[in-house]
């Protein structure tokens, strides 16, 4: 199933921008300062940044410019998440806000067409035309690969380079369950081509992708069963955060089955049957569609890494802390080499590569502070370390938590399920990590990410005026709680003596 299916006006617009049928690759212009293989976020940032600084740049893409984020990731998934939230708000408006409406129905084809319209509207920024005409990049559409340590090839044309970047990204993993893929199972690369709402949907994997789409489809009206062989949902997050999300999923009608193994899948009437096993107990789950929302595999195949002298493994291309591969001419950026496979880390790694590859920089990927967010409702955002990581490193911490149920704006918004939890180095205001669970946790997390990155402690946040009423006030309240701990018994005694003296 192609990302440009089904045929529609908006998908045709998307294709015209990110992989036009009538595209003619240019003639190579001698030796390039930079050849980039992969036109996702990391590759596009590398190409645009280098060309903007005067470099001669070639960009090779075999599927669709914009990569996962634009075509099958962040953009389409968040369009569905927002539509699902709108449906939920309409259904619950009377109980929560006294706003009455007629019976709420979801026009799923219209939801999907809106998503495709939004995706197409965003796509000109990543288009082949823009990169060629506005940015001066030589864009080659086709399958590119290395044929030598200093040469890549695409469509029969050899591109010599001083430096190259591997930015081929990652794809949905092909988990080995008998009969699963033969049943027509969907993943994040194919689910956005649906035109009809599945009446019954099984989602395999209770990580970020699985939880986001399980909740969205449940809100659209599907009977959703979420399956994972471990517990709880979002098991890598703070346990309190996982508990809030599990409650939200169940409240939205998602059935969660933990610690079940899927023995095999059968196709036929009355649907696709998953044979589940747990502690010797067998169950059958019959659904109309199966979504696989677990695992990512790096795209290291068929790009000539051996001929380029680039070492790689099943985890991706091997790089040092400066993102240089085992070939000193070649660097890697984005999902092909990073542990944190996010659009924003792909962007950040591309900027590191530009400095290190072209301008003798020594920036390190390990120096980055990486925030992330899962866009369930409520959202879960995190930055820095977790308590378990602090313990492993021998760091003593103190944790401060502010429930949103005591934050005025969250109460007024009807969004009081969640909290702000901040970990500081014990005895100091230094923030080591934070988790935010809130309706818009990703937006709130920016302040904490800035603080961790730049060494801004809770004492400084406490001294910063936050507008009232906002949900961000929760962060200020955590900081105020920290400040109160500085009032030691000795300091309190001195203050009482001072106040007694003033009364004379």
Image (cartoon, rainbow, N blue to C red):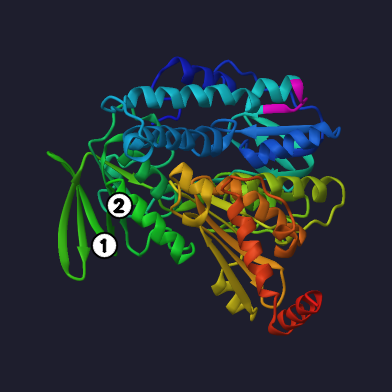
| Residue 60 x %, y % | 65, 33
Say if residue 325 shows up in the picture: no
Image check: 224 left or right of 207?
left
Image check: 149 left or right of 233?
right
265 w.r.t. 484: above or below: above
Q: Which mark is residue 250?
A: 2
Give the image quarter of residue 269. Answer: top left
Question: What residue is drawn where x is 29% and y is 65%?
Answer: 259
- Is residue 267 shown in magenta? no
Cβ–Cβ under 8 Å for marks 2 and 1: no
Image quadrant containing the N terminus: top left
| Residue 116 x %, y % | 46, 24
Dot 2: element:
helix
Q: Which mark is residue 280?
A: none
Give the image quarter of residue 184. Answer: top left
**Which residue was labeled with disc 1?**
260
Question: What residue is drawn where x is 57% and y is 52%?
Answer: 372
| Residue 244 x %, y % | 40, 57
Q: CA distance from mark 2 to mark 1?
A: 18 Å
Question: What residue is drawn where x is 47% and y is 63%?
Answer: 236
Q: What segment carries the magenta color?
A: 134-139
């Amino acid at each position: 199933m192609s990302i440009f299916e089904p045929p529609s006006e908006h998908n045709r617009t998307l294709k015209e921008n990110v992989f036009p049928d009538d595209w003619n690759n240019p003639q190579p212009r001698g030796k390039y300062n930079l050849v980039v293989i992969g036109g996702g976020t990391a590759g596009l940032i590398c190409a645009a940044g280098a060309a903007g600084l005067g470099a001669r740049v070639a960009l090779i893409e075999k599927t669709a410019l914009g990569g996962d984020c634009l075509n099958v990731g962040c953009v389409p998934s968040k369009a569905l998440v927002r539509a699902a939230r709108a449906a939920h708000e309409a259904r619950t408006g009377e109980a929560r806000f006294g706003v009455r409406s007629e019976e709420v129905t979801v026009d799923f084809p219209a939801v999907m067409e809106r998503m495709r319209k939004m995706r197409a509207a965003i796509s000109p920024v990543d288009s082949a035309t823009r990169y060629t005409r506005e940015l001066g990049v030589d864009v080659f559409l086709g399958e590119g690969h290395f044929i030598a340590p200093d040469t890549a090839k695409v469509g029969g044309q050899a591109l010599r380079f001083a430096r190259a970047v591997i930015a081929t990204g990652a794809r949905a993993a092909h988990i080995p369950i008998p009969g699963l893929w033969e049943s027509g199972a969907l993943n994040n690369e194919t689910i956005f081509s649906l035109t009809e709402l599945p009446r019954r949907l099984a989602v395999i994997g209770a990580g970020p992708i699985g939880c986001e789409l399980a909740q969205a489809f449940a809100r659209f009206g599907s009977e959703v069963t979420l399956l994972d062989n471990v517990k709880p949902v979002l098991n890598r997050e703070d346990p309190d955060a996982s508990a809030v999300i599990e409650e939200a999923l169940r409240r939205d009608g998602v059935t969660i089955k933990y610690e079940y193994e899927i023995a095999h899948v059968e196709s036929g009437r009355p649907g696709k049957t998953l044979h589940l096993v747990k502690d010797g107990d067998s169950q059958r789950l019959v659904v109309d569609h199966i979504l696989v929302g677990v695992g990512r595999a790096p795209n290291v195949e068929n790009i000539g890494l051996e001929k380029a002298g680039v070492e790689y493994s099943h985890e991706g291309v091997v790089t040092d802390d400066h993102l240089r591969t085992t070939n000193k001419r070649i660097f890697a950026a984005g999902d092909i080499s990073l542990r944190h496979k996010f659009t924003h880390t792909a962007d950040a790694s591309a900027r590191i590569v530009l400095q290190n590859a072209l301008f003798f920089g020594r920036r390190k990927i390990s120096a980055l502070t990486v925030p992330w967010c899962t866009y369930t409702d409520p959202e879960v955002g995190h930055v820095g370390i977790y308590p378990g990581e602090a313990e492993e490193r021998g760091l003593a911490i103190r944790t401060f938590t502010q429930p949103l149920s005591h934050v005025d704006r969250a109460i007024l918004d009807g969004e009081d399920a969640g909290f702000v939890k901040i970990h500081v180095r014990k005895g100091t205001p230094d923030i080591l990590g934070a988790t935010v669970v809130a309706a818009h946790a990703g937006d709130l997390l920016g302040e904490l990410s800035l603080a961790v990155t730049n060494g801004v402690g809770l004492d400084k946040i406490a001294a910063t005026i936050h507008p009232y009423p906002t949900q961000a006030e929760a962060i200020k309240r955590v900081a105020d709680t920290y400040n109160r701990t500085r009032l030691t018994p000795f300091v309190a005694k001195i203050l009482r003596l001072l106040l007694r003296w003033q009364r004379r």
